[in-house]
Image (cartoon, helix red, strand yellow):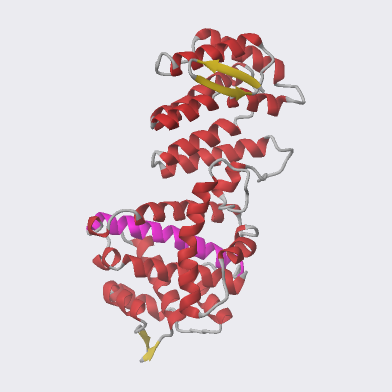
Amino acid sequence: MRRVSIGRFEFDVHPLEQQTLEAAFDRLYRSVMVEEAEPQLDSEFRAAASQYFDRYVVSPDAPAAHDHYFYGFSPLWAYFRSKGRLDWAEKIWQLALDPAREWEDAHSGQQIDKGVPYYFWAIAALLRGGIDSGYVLAHQAAEEDSRTSSGIKYPDTPAYALVSLNYDKVNQAFKGWVDEQANFFRVFITDYCNVYGRPFSIDDVRDKFLRNPPNHDVVFLLTHTLARLREMSEIPCRAKQNQFVGQLQLNLLFDLLLVIDNAIKQKNISKWQFVDHGTFLLDHAGHALPQMGEINAQFKANFGSCTTDALDGKLMIFGRILDRLQCDVALAYGLRNRGAHKVESDSVIWNDFDRIERSVFRTLCATIDYLY
């Protein structure tokens, strides 16, 4: 490691074995940490970076060398985080990427391994509250990791751990975030176990589904939706009493229902409608409901009262009260159709969202429990 002393700061960085680039980094450190200037890359830095990439792009050591270049920005990232300047913590990774993109533009067909900067940029975005941008950047990091991993589509990297909810992976800089998402999911899994008396855990979700999904896009949609639902949960209930929040909540539930839909379809490949998938799930769970299609007319006629009846375990078909699992799957069916065809929300969504959310998660857990 190379020890750098800048004012009162001392830290270690990977040696780059190119004096001009190391000197350019030292000037950048001093400008930010001592002079407290906004981070900028001068022309000398860009030229030195280009020479560095020229040297390592076709080398067997290229991926590690590229990582060492990007790790050179880590002290600045840590400095900005300590100062609470998350805007600059994001900007530093954008700056780090600039010379790499410029070099790629000038060398058609050749690429720099950019997994590291996209991953840390994703962390900065998530810390700033940018769920969508953070997950977009994390997926870009995973894509970069895949491209440089000898044909492995989803290598075991920190970026992939973030987007796939791999809470077991210790070697990831943002493990705390992944653990928080897993803990949020555990609350719903515990609810499922308590309601149905099933021996089911998040490790079952991991082993049965996350590691063996119908396709990886389903996992990615699930983890992103979990993050957005968790963010929504942190808004006080009294601030979530309006038409727009109901539509947003319905949209998030719709994404979760897409996960359920695709998960069941993998096991029920001859069918494509949600009503068929709901019937299939209930059959395999031992709660057969051949009249599932009759539910749709009830929800269309009075969505609010049907939703409340399903939540209260009072929903009926042909004079027969449905059991708890049948009510949960029926509600999922009603929400799926509502979310697909209606823009406006219903007050029952925001007034009883916690119970609706738990019901949909129970259907997801049942899908994994009984079909995977």
The residue nearer to you, when weighing 313 against 331, is 313
Q: Is residue 30 magenta?
A: no
- Residue found at x 49% / y 24%: 76
Secondary structure character of the magenta stretch overall: helix
Q: Is residue 259 magenta?
A: yes
Q: Is residue 235 above or below residue 338?
A: above
The quadrant of the rendering that contains the C terminus is bottom right
Please say if 326 is above or below 217.
below
Q: Residue at x 46, y 27 (%)?
A: 79
Residue 272, x across and y down, in percent: 53, 67
> As drawn, is 72 to the left or to the right of 190?
right
Name the side, left or right, on which 331 lies relative to 170: left
For image coordinates 32% across by 80% down, the residue present is 309
The quarter of the image holding the N terminus is top right
Q: Who is closer to the viewer here, 43 or 180?
A: 180
Estimate the x, y position of residue 136 in percent, counting from the top left: 49, 41
Q: Quadrant of residue 293?
A: bottom left
Q: How far across and how far down the image is residue 173, in percent?
A: 56, 40
Res 273 visible: no
Residue 109, position as x, y percentages in the image: 66, 24
Q: Which residues are magenta?
A: 242-267
Which of the 4 image quadrants contains residue 211?
bottom right
